[in-house]
Image (cartoon, grey):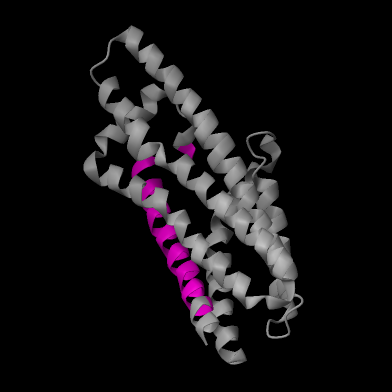
């Protein structure tokens, strides 16, 4: 009974995280030209960031913590697949690493980038050149390498391991496991967009499919666990 409550709570966490992701992403797309603005220079991005005021900063702060909702979902998937304890233990660890990576990548916006934006508005040309270098370095390290590549590869691996584990559970329909496997492969391919521009279209599709898959997975965990009860 206790494990079923954990599974249901984790499934709900995935659904809430997906809906919150859509809401925050939509706000940033409308008010910050996100994610296209990620390719912009400090001269273009920092004034826009600072101009958004406290609301923009708060939205980025919320966005930075949203990946944490993946951890209860990963715990739920672990308990929902008892036939694959070893695989799901690895999946839980990888999901935790991916969550931390994505949080670190996103946290640069309401913290360091916000501080840079405040200084940039009053800085001279020489100081602005230094800020530009710091801005680009943070985007490359925390953004491209940590948040996007490491975070998305870890999340995709979690979905892949969960999909294979679901195939071994009688309570889950086979199509659910296979859909998870196919989606996870596409998701990991999209993580290479900063290496190979040809997969950018895959990444754009992933942005649309990620919240949908989180809702499906969360609903399946909650529903089939109740049926199993």
In the rendered image, the vertical position of residue 134 relative to residue 125, given as above or below: below
In the rendered image, the vertical position of residue 149 relative to residue 94, given as above or below: above
Quarter-of-image position of residue 164:
bottom right
Which sits in the foreground, 145 or 25? 145
Q: Residue at x 70, y 47 (%)?
A: 189
Residue 115 placed where, x, y %?
A: 30, 29
Quarter-of-image position of residue 89:
bottom right
Residue 152 placed where, x, y %?
A: 60, 48
**Span highlighted in magenta in the image:** 7-36
Could one spot residue 107 in this view of the protein? yes
Which sits in the foreground, 77 or 25? 77
Could one spot residue 33 in this view of the protein? no
Toward the top, the furthest residue is 126
Residue 206 placed where, x, y %?
A: 60, 54
In the rendered image, the vertical position of residue 78 relative to residue 122, given as above or below: below
Quarter-of-image position of residue 160:
bottom right
Which sits in the foreground, 136 or 6? 6
In the rendered image, the vertical position of residue 131 relative to residue 68, given as above or below: above
Q: Is residue 228 left or right of residue 28?
A: right
Residue 126 placed where, x, y %?
A: 35, 7
Magenta stretch holds residue 18: yes
Magenta stretch holds residue 50: no
Image quarter in which the C terminus is found: bottom right
């Amino acid at each position: 009974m206790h494990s079923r409550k954990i599974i249901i709570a984790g499934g709900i966490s995935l659904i809430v995280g997906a809906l919150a992701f859509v809401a925050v992403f939509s706000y940033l797309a409308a008010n910050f030209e996100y994610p296209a603005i990620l390719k912009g220079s400090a001269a273009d991005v920092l004034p826009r960031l600072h101009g958004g005021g406290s609301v923009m900063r708060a939205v980025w702060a919320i966005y930075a913590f949203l990946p944490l909702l993946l951890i209860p979902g990963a715990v739920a998937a672990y308990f929902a697949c008892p036939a694959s304890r070893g695989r799901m233990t690895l999946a839980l660890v990888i999901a935790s690493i991916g969550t931390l990576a994505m949080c670190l990548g996103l946290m640069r916006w309401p913290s360091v980038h916000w501080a840079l934006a405040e200084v940039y508005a009053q800085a001279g040309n020489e100081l602005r050149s230094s800020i530009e270098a710091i801005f680009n370095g943070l985007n490359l390290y925390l953004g491209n390498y940590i948040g996007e590549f490491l975070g998305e590869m870890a999340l995709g691996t979690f979905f892949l391991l969960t999909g294979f584990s679901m195939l071994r559970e009688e309570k889950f329909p086979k199509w659910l496991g296979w859909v998870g496997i196919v989606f996870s492969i596409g998701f990991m391919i999209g993580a290479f967009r900063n290496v190979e521009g040809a997969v950018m279209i895959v990444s754009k599709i992933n942005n649309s499919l990620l919240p949908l898959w989180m809702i499906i997975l969360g609903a399946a965990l909650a529903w089939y666990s109740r049926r199993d009860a």
